[in-house]
Amino acid sequence: MTSRRLAPVCLVLALSVPAGAEPPKVDYPTGYRQWAFVKSMVIYSDKNPLFGEFGGLHNLYANAEAMRAYTKGGTFPDGSVIVFDLLEAKDENGAWVGGDRKFIGVMRKDRGKYKATGGWGFEGFKGDSRTERMVTDASAQCFGCHQRQKDNDFVFSGYRP
Amino acid sequence: MTSRRLAPVCLVLALSVPAGAEPPKVDYPTGYRQWAFVKSMVIYSDKNPLFGEFGGLHNLYANAEAMRAYTKGGTFPDGSVIVFDLLEAKDENGAWVGGDRKFIGVMRKDRGKYKATGGWGFEGFKGDSRTERMVTDASAQCFGCHQRQKDNDFVFSGYRP
């Protein structure tokens, strides 16, 4: 009887993330270019402290779950995905236009899987690649900055209607 | 019998635009902020010849019909709508960010209604207004420039995947 009564407990343990293990990777956000558009921006000068890492033309996209929080406020629900799409900014005759893609950054909300980083999983994909991942330590590479935005559920951007 | 045989001809004439009449106005594109996003750009300096009229942060949106032509090529089908959304560009610490909306420009394809302007109707709506129209003479205010783009169905923008 003992082994039978323990079985459900073991199943639950097997399905949850073992202590100390890496959280699951965030998938490439297939189709994000057809998602709702959040806002754009150009970081064009090293006067901006983010220029080194994030200089370029920014376009932000959100899936339907994330759009609910962007437009109605409140916490982002599990399943929310936000894509930060960074293109080179090229100066063409007094205009900043988009060049090659530098990378996309992806945040995916899953409070069960990503407890250590505010309920968000983070990933980057280099250039136009769907497989060349950039994040090896989300706490250090991403959450170190994003935790400053705790009052906004760790998100920097706001929706521009 | 004569009057009966003429009836269908008269009906067709009544439904078409009378010669010399103004073409119908282009509607405000309700919901365009949730449409697919085409591309963004910042015109920031009077080095650019379009700065006076179009200086600012540009975001372009397309409905599903227009997206077919943007992504697969060919002529834009009737019903295509493209929205050019122009925000003030504010320089914040080495970054251009979006400020107040200056206006939106709207192109709507209907080859039957807008023959004189390449099959496209043109309109502008000031600021965030849905009623304050800006176009009184589409040929002079809009098509004068757009006709240079004849080989691209009179459209300037290309989709940035």
Image (cartoon, coloured by chain):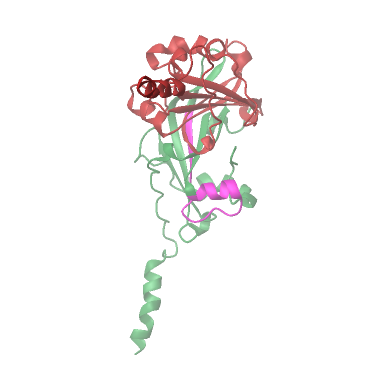
Chain colours: A red, B green
Q: Which residues are magenta?
A: B65-87
Q: Is residue B66 magenta?
A: yes
Q: Is residue A23 magenta?
A: no
> Within the image, what quadrant is residue B160 found in?
top right
Q: Is residue A137 left or right of residue A64?
A: right
Q: Residue at x 40, y 72 (%)?
A: B12
Which image quarter holds the N terminus of chain B?
Answer: bottom left
Residue A161 can be seen, yes or no = no
Which image quarter holds the C terminus of chain B?
Answer: top right
Closer-to-camera residue (A139/B97)? A139
The image position of residue A110, as x and y in percent, is 43, 23
Q: Identify whether B74 is placed above or below B126.
A: below
The image position of residue B4, as x and y in percent, is 34, 85
Count the marks: how many? Answer: 0
The image position of residue A49, as x and y in percent, is 57, 10
The image position of residue A111, as x and y in percent, is 41, 20
